[in-house]
């Protein structure tokens, strides 16, 4: 009916506005912080750029982590910690985004189920990243030995599981028969989180490899 079409159109319009608002908000905050860090700590920025070459998305890596230059300095552990913090922040903002989509009217049953499943997997992803951050901090107490490998192995396992959860959410929107706007909006957000998490895992792996105890 005309009334139903009007509601769907209004829902799509609200969706587009939400995407624009969240994207601009994220960009402005990180851009301002990064510019400040670049002028105050160029050595740390250089360290971040070199380290980010080990990731699958180096440009995104530098964009996200430059804002933490003053905290990271030239510590591989602190860089991995910052990357995990960014991943957690992005995942939390995304689950808020998905929750808002879940409450929107006009979603088809299949879309509604996919959004619900995505909420569950993203919640699990957040839990995995959340517990990996304090676990990474424990590695600072051990420069060598089995304790170091135990803690860093836990971090690698949990962050890898978080990345799997995020990719699972993406897979739920890969089929046909779904609203293009809903599908595009969610894929854009989840893909961004997955890329950030992938980078965080790469930096954790780099930290582990460079500080792995000698046989």
Image (spheres, rainbow, N blue to C red):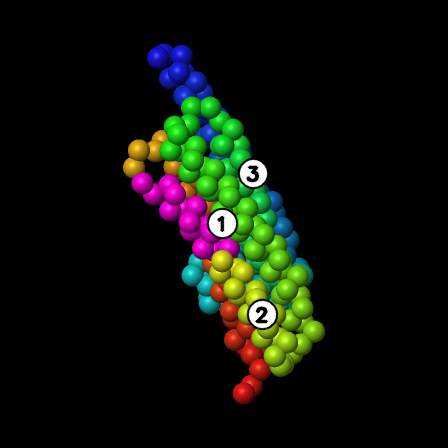
Q: Residue at x 50, y 37 (%)?
A: 98
- For the residues marked 2 and 1, what is the alpha-carbon distance in whole angstroms? 22 Å
Please provide the residue range marked out in magenta: 162-175
Name which quarter of the figure residue 39 lies in. Answer: bottom right
Numbered badge on residue 96 = 3
- For the residues marked 2 and 3, what is the alpha-carbon distance in whole angstroms? 29 Å
Q: Nearer the viewer, residue 43 or 128?
A: 128
Q: Which residue is mark 2?
A: 152
Q: Whole-percent x and y of residue 38?
A: 60, 58
Q: Whole-percent x and y of residue 78?
A: 63, 65
199 horizontally vs 42: left or right:
left
Numbered badge on residue 193 = 1
Q: What is the crowding at mark 3: few (fewer than 14 residues within 10 Å), some, or many (at least 20)?
A: few
Dots 2, 3 in contact, CB < 8 A:
no
Q: Residue at x 51, y 46 (%)?
A: 122
Q: Is residue 82 above or below residue 190?
A: below
Instruction: Choose the circle earlier in sequence order: 1 or 3.
Output: 3
Q: Nearer the viewer, mark 1 or mark 3?
A: 3
Is residue 207 something one can see in this rendering? no
């Amino acid at each position: 009916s005309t009334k139903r079409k009007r509601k769907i159109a209004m829902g799509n319009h609200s969706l587009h506005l939400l995407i624009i608002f969240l994207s601009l908000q994220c960009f402005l905050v990180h851009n301002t912080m990064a510019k400040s860090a670049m002028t105050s700590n160029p050595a740390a920025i250089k360290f971040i750029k070199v380290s980010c070459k080990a990731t699958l998305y180096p440009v995104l890596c530098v964009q996200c982590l430059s804002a933490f230059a003053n905290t990271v300095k030239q510590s591989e552990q602190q860089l991995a910690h910052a990357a995990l913090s960014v991943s957690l922040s992005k995942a939390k903002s995304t689950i808020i985004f998905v929750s808002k989509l879940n409450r929107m009217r006009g979603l088809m049953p299949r879309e509604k189920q996919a959004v619900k499943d995505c909420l569950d997997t993203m919640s699990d992803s957040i839990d995995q990243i959340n517990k990996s951050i304090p676990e990474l901090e424990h590695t600072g107490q051990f420069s060598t030995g089995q304790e170091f490998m135990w803690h860093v192995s836990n971090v690698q396992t949990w962050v890898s599981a978080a990345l799997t959860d995020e990719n699972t959410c993406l897979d739920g929107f890969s089929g046909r028969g779904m609203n293009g706007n809903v599908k595009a909006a969610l894929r854009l957000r989840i893909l961004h989180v997955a890329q950030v998490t992938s980078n965080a895992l790469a930096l954790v792996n780099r930290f582990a490899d460079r500080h792995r105890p000698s046989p």
